[in-house]
């Protein structure tokens, strides 16, 4: 997996991927991140990347030309260039990496699957993503989709955002990391990169853990594989994780739930499942609507809801 990040603040990423499993993944060559300074694709003395908005209003907007140039240098063709290439039956190779490289010198791929239809053998599966508060909400499901690609290109906005024509011409997806407004796309790009990279095979020490965490998927398949080891039954359409405890068994007067220490794996599994349901009902009831729940889950949920109603009636 290769990740290219286009930003006006390349220094933002210095150090951010140098920790934990992401550092190890990059160190072992499982992935590569290249950060590109948008200002390297300007041509004026002031290295101007922004301009006033048409129609008036607050703030500044990132100009389209430097971003288009940066993307061309990364071998990304515009929608029109791709259409032309399809008509002509060729795969355009756009640009070269002669300018604008910042932290690591990237290598331009031979060609890009976005420039080919259908993607030829050996084509890189690339997606260009615009980070934007107006985008579709980034989820674990999208992280899984992106992790299956060869390459993602992340375009970071600043100021009031990016000239919309960049979105129309180059971007496959507009992603938001949540319902709030950040001052720039850099944090969002780092969030997307982290969530995607940890899903790559070999990145997590324990491969199973990504299947058993919050928003995990296809629980039924995993569940049939249990060999006496208590597993969370995560996923089942994406419930939240259960609470975790470690030593000491007592901390500040609070004991670890007894059930976790009695070695009865069936009981532990049931308890964890109940906790998942409780947490999801309390914090993210929307997830329950899409979850694949068993009959036992439904009974547990009914019981939890009854308890909550009784508690509310008393208080
Ligand atoms: N005018 C924009 C709006 O109201 O939607 C906000 C622009 S914001 C100040 C500047 C940049 O930060 C955006 O172009 C985008 O790249 C990034 N950004 C802000 N909030 C984001 C979010 N929730 N998810 C992803 N990127 C975000």
Image (cartoon, rainbow, N blue to C red):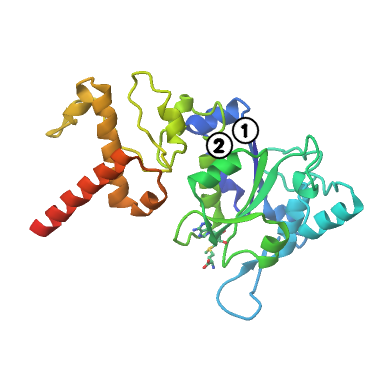
Q: Are marks 2 and 1 in contact (CB under 8 Å)?
A: yes
Towards the viewer: 310 or 244: 310
Kindly state the secondary structure of the residue where label 2 is placed. helix
Q: Which labelled disc corresponds to residue 197?
A: 2
**CA neighbours of label 2 inside 10 A, class few (<14), some (14 to 19), many (20+):** many
- Which residue corresponds to mark 1? 31
**How far separated are the C-alphas under marks 2 and 1?**
7 Å
Kindly state the secondary structure of the residue where label 1 is placed. loop
Q: Which labelled disc corresponds to residue 189?
A: none
Residue 145: x, y in percent? 58, 43
Quarter of the rendering containing residue 274: top left
Mark positioned earlier in the residue sequence (2 or 1): 1
Point 38% across, 52% down: residue: 289
Quarter of the rendering containing residue 259: top left
- Farthest residue toward the front? 295
Q: Considering only vertical position in the picture, is 43 above or below 302? A: below
* Left or right for 117, reference 39: right
Residue 307: x, y in percent? 16, 49
* Left or right for 243, reference 287: left
Total numbered badges shown on the rendered structure? 2
Q: Considering only vertical position in the picture, is 273 above or below 170? A: above
**CA neighbours of label 1 inside 10 A, class few (<14), some (14 to 19), many (20+):** some
Residue 82: x, y in percent? 81, 54
């Amino acid at each position: 997996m290769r990740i290219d990040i286009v930003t006006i603040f390349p220094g933002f990423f210095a150090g951010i991927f140098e920790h934990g499993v992401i550092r190890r993944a990059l160190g072992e060559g499982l992935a590569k991140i290249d950060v590109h300074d948008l200002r390297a694709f300007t041509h004026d003395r002031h290295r101007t990347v922004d301009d006033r908005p048409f129609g008036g209003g607050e703030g500044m907007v990132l100009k389209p030309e430097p971003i288009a140039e940066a993307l061309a240098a990364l071998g990304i063709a515009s929608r029109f260039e791709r259409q032309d290439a399809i008509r002509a039956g060729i795969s355009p190779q756009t640009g070269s990496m002669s300018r604008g490289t910042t932290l690591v010198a990237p290598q331009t791929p031979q060609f890009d699957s976005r420039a080919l239809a259908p993607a030829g053998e050996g084509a890189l599966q690339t997606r260009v993503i615009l980070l934007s508060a107006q985008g579709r909400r980034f989820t674990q499901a999208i992280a899984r989709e992106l992790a299956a690609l060869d390459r993602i290109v992340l375009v970071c906005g600043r100021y009031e955002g990016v000239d919309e024509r960049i979105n129309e011409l180059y971007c496959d997806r507009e992603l938001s990391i949540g319902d709030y407004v950040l001052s720039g796309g850099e944090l969002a790009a780092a969030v997307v990169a982290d969530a995607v990279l940890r899903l790559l095979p070999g990145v997590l020490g324990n491969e199973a853990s990504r299947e058993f965490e919050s928003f995990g998927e296809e629980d039924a398949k995993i569940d049939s594989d249990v060999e006496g080891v208590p597993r969370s039954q995560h996923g089942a359409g994406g419930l939240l994780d259960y609470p975790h405890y470690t030593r000491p068994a007592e901390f500040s007067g609070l004991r670890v739930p007894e059930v976790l220490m009695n070695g009865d794996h069936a009981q532990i599994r049931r308890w964890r499942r109940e906790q998942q349901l409780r947490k999801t009902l309390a914090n993210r009831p929307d997830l329950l609507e899409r979850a694949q729940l068993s009959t036992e889950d439904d009974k547990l949920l009914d019981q939890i809801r009854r308890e909550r109603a009784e508690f509310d009636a008393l208080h």
